[in-house]
């Protein structure tokens, strides 16, 4: 799949004045993508720093949120590289680079889906078994689960690199309609078995997440009322802090809102062996979901946790104060 830069530019209408210009929608997505990526990277990086620095977040729920931020930051870095290569360097990806990027992207995307599943199960366990939750879910057990989850993600991502495309186990390549290196979901001959395994597991995971979401949503209000009655005695007139359950509900809501449409249309595409929607629409459902998801979770953390809002402001304020100190520094006359 070695593509020469000149051929890449001609195919993608870059530097080729005889070809029609990009549409308004494509140009708009092109210019707003870099700020979105940078905001997502900064937000997730700050979230990781805050979780690491605050002792009260050193619990299974806090570590899972940190792992999700780490996965999304890694996805953002990979997508940033795609963006620079595709939109600024005007050059195609060489075969080996494309395979590595597809492999890394699959690792972190698979990992993020599993982390969201663990977050849902963790919060569901806390809701259903509030007294036994500290016994069932501990930091040590979570560390073991995260190690096995990383091994599983690495193994799944390595399947298309084993040269088993003759039995449909996948092949990494540049896919035009999603603008990244991954699996061509319209090529069932080489990718059908891999796609079936991956999306079957993803559908099972989504079903578990939806079940946990329903349990959390229906039982959280009653649990919240019970805790308020207990906290009034200790807090008195103080306002009790917002609960982690709200954060989890928001994370799961946006996850399902962005993931379900992409999964449905991908399954339809696999069944019919062709794209069932315009390539730009499918690009938005897949490629752009990676962008948007990287900035939403840090906003959720800041909305739900006063500590996150304070630390965001504290870090940014200190950076601005240091910059003002440097700019106002009077150098001595020599």
Image: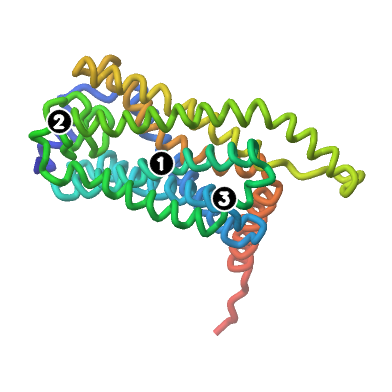
| Label 1 secondary element | helix
Q: Do the residues labelled 3 and 1 touch (CB within 8 Å)?
A: no
Residue 13 visible? The answer is no
Whichever of callouts 3 and 1 sits on the residue coming sooner in the sequence is 1
Observer-nearest residue: 272 or 278? 272
Instruction: Give the labeled residue for mark 1.
Output: 34
Q: Residue at x 18, y 41 (%)?
A: 160
Whichever of callouts 3 and 2 sits on the residue coming sooner in the sequence is 2
Indicate the quadrant where residue 220 lies. Answer: top right
Question: Callout 1: 10 Å neighbours few (<14), some, many (20+)?
Answer: some
Most extreme residue toward the bottom is 334
Q: Is the residue 50 above or below the residue 331 in the image? A: above
Label placed on residue 137? 3
| Label 2 secondary element | helix
Instruction: Give the labeled residue for mark 2.
Output: 11
On screen, residue 82 versus residue 259, left or right, reads left
Give me the C-alpha separation between circle 3 and circle 2. 53 Å
| Label 3 secondary element | loop
């Amino acid at each position: 799949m070695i593509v020469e830069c000149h051929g890449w530019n001609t195919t993608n209408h870059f530097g080729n004045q005889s070809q029609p210009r990009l549409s308004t929608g494509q140009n708009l997505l092109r210019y707003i993508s870099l700020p979105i990526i940078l905001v997502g990277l900064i937000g997730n990086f700050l979230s990781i720093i805050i979780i690491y620095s605050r002792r009260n977040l050193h619990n299974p729920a806090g570590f899972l949120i940190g792992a999700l931020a780490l996965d999304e930051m890694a996805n953002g870095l990979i997508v940033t590289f795609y963006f620079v290569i595709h939109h600024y360097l005007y050059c195609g990806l060489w075969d080996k680079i494309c395979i590595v990027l597809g492999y890394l992207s699959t690792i972190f995307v698979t990992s993020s889906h599993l982390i969201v599943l663990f977050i849902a199960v963790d919060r569901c366990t806390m809701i259903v078994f509030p007294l036994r939750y500290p016994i069932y879910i501990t930091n040590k057990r979570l560390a073991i689960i995260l190690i096995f989850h990383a091994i599983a993600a690495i193994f799944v991502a390595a399947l298309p690199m084993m040269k088993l495309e003759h039995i449909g186990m996948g092949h990494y390549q540049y896919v035009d309609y999603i603008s990244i290196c991954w699996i061509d979901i319209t090529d069932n001959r080489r990718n059908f078995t891999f796609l079936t395994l991956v999306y079957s597991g993803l559908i099972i995971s989504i079903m578990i997440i939806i079940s946990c979401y329903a349990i959390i949503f229906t039982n959280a209000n009653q649990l919240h009322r019970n805790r308020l009655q207990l906290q009034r005695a200790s807090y008195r007139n103080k306002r009790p802090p917002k609960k982690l359950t709200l954060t989890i509900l928001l994370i799961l809501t946006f996850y399902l809102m962005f993931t379900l449409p992409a999964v449905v249309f991908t399954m339809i595409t696999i069944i019919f062996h062709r794209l069932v929607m315009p390539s730009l629409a499918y690009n938005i459902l897949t490629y752009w979901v990676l962008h948007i998801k990287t900035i939403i979770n840090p906003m959720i953390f800041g909305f739900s946790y006063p500590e996150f809002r304070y630390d965001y402001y504290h870090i940014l304020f200190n950076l601005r104060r240091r910059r003002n100190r440097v700019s106002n520094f009077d150098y001595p006359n020599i």
